[in-house]
Every structure is written in structure tokens, then in C-alpha cells.
Amino acid sequence: MPLSERQLAAFVDKHAVQIPYDTSPRHLAGPGDARHVTHGLAAAGWNAVSDPLSAEIILASPDLRHRLQFDPQSRTSAWWRLRAEPVGTEPGWYAEFGELVPAEVLAAFTDALIAPPPQQPDPWQQVTSAGWHHEPHGARSPDSMCHIELRPLSEFHDQPSWHIETREPGHGEFPGPRIWHAYLDENTPAHLVSAFLTALTDRSPLHRGMFERTGHYSAVQEPSALRPQQVVDAYATRIKHLRARTRSARRQQTKPATAPAHASTAQPAARR
């Protein structure tokens, strides 16, 4: 079923009375509201195919190629799983994300899946411009708690895969406990990788409520200059744009193909 006004109203009811705090860096901002992801997909026509009384949510794309699973009772550290089935010459792919991945960062990934950008920028461009430090095959955040790694080829994989981890500060060569992770396999489209990394390394803060969970106690929170209604309005605008882009894409798919004009090798037609 499409995203309903009642569902949107439930989001508004929560956030319209929640004083927003600018929370940074993003990799420590905490999970936020999962509806940033699920509402965006529902606005694009994805359907819930899970048991409505279950804590698990499974959404399927209209063409049934893509499937998102959100399982807050998962026995593993992967609460979000996104799969794409192979179609024609396009390979299938898989991505997973831990519990404390900020929903807004994951939503950038799923928004790019719904409406691919016109260009596919270099995934490293935003990472380096955001001040993250270069490492062999990757980068790390200024606080050294989040690492992005493009793991090289191996006997099991013919292309590199992406591994992102946020960890507690370690001691010497020993890394601290993991806070969250993300894994994007070797076939994940480049524009989706770029969207995720761009949103993750963006220096602008995310908005969290005063007592809302963050990813780590070292996250910095300051009262936001935005009013609660502005946060809600920005959310509603994003949903509106996703709906419009989805309708536009569907119209393009259903347009009858225009017959190409036959090129003539003879002399040009006479002028009238």
C-alpha cells in the first residue's frame, strides 16, 4: 500500500513536539527515525510484504527486483538488509547495515536507488573534501572512529567490496568494540555507494531529540537553530519530491516509443 496521510501524520506528531539538537559527527549521531528509509520507499511505490503484526518489516519494489528487510530482532549485527535480484546482464547485489547506522544516511542510499542521479560521481570525492584522512584502500574520519575500506580482490571476489565500520577508540594497534558497520558487495552500483559515502561524510549535523539515542557519548549535541516545524517541513518536502520523481519515471516508462526517422541515402527532399 502507498504511504498514507495517517502514516505521515504519525511522523509529524512525534517530531513537531521534539526540540531538535544538531548532532555530529554523523557516524556517531545514532539511528534516528527508521521512517526516513521506509517512508521514502513507500512513497516510491514499494509495498510491505511482511506480517503486519511482526516487528520485522519487509518492503519490495514494484518490479519485485529489490527487497529491503528491517529486523530489529536480528540475531546478527545487521538490522537492515537490501537485496537486488539479477536481471538480464545486470548482476544481483547485496548490502547490509547495522543498528546504529543513521537512518538519514541509509535513506540517501535508498533515495538514490529510487531515483538515480544523472551522473555517477567518484565515491571518494566527497570523502576527501570532507577532511577524512587517506589510508591504503580507504579513509578514516577526523576522530579516527569511522573507517571506510575498499577491500581488494580476493580468490572469492573478482571485484572489490566496501566495508565501513565505526568503532570505539582503541588502544594502540587494537581497535575498540564495533558501534556499527555497513557492507556493500562488489556489485553494488557505484552511484549508491557514492550516495551513502556522501551522506555519511557530510559535515552538516543530523537532528536528534534531547533524549534520543546517539551512537556514542562523544557525539556533540547543540540546540539547533531550526524549529521543530522546519524539520517536519523539510521531511514533507523530501517525500513530495520522491513521489513526483517516481511519477515522472513511470510516465517515461509508459510513453510509446517514437519511431525513428529513416535516414535517406538519396538526394534530400525538395523544398516546398
Image: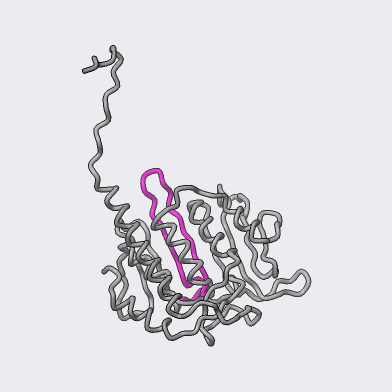
The residue sitting at 33% across, 62% down in the picture is 243
The mark total stands at 0
In the displayed structure image, the side of residue 265 where residue 154 appears, left or right = right
- When the figure is inspected, residue 251 is found, relative to residue 55, above or below; the finding is above
Residue lying farthest left?
272
Q: How are the colours assigned in the image?
A: one colour
Q: Is residue 113 magenta?
A: no
Q: Quadrant of residue 219?
A: bottom right
Above or below for 266 versus 244: above
Q: Quadrant of residue 110?
A: bottom left
Q: Quadrant of the N terminus?
A: bottom left
Please state the horizontal and vertical placement of residue 94, each as a whole percent of the image: 46, 59
Quarter of image, res 15: bottom left
Residue at figure coordinates x 43%, y 49% from the top left? 91
Name the outermost residue toward the right. 172
Tell me where residue 208 appears, x and y as whole percent. 52, 79
Closer to the camera, 222 or 83?
Answer: 222
Q: Which residues are magenta?
A: 73-99
The one of 16 and 161 positioned closer to us in this rendering: 16
Quadrant into which the C terminus falls: top left
Q: Residue at x 32, y 72 (%)?
A: 50
* Residue that lies at the very extreme toward the top in this rendered image: 267
Front-most of residues 134 and 161: 134
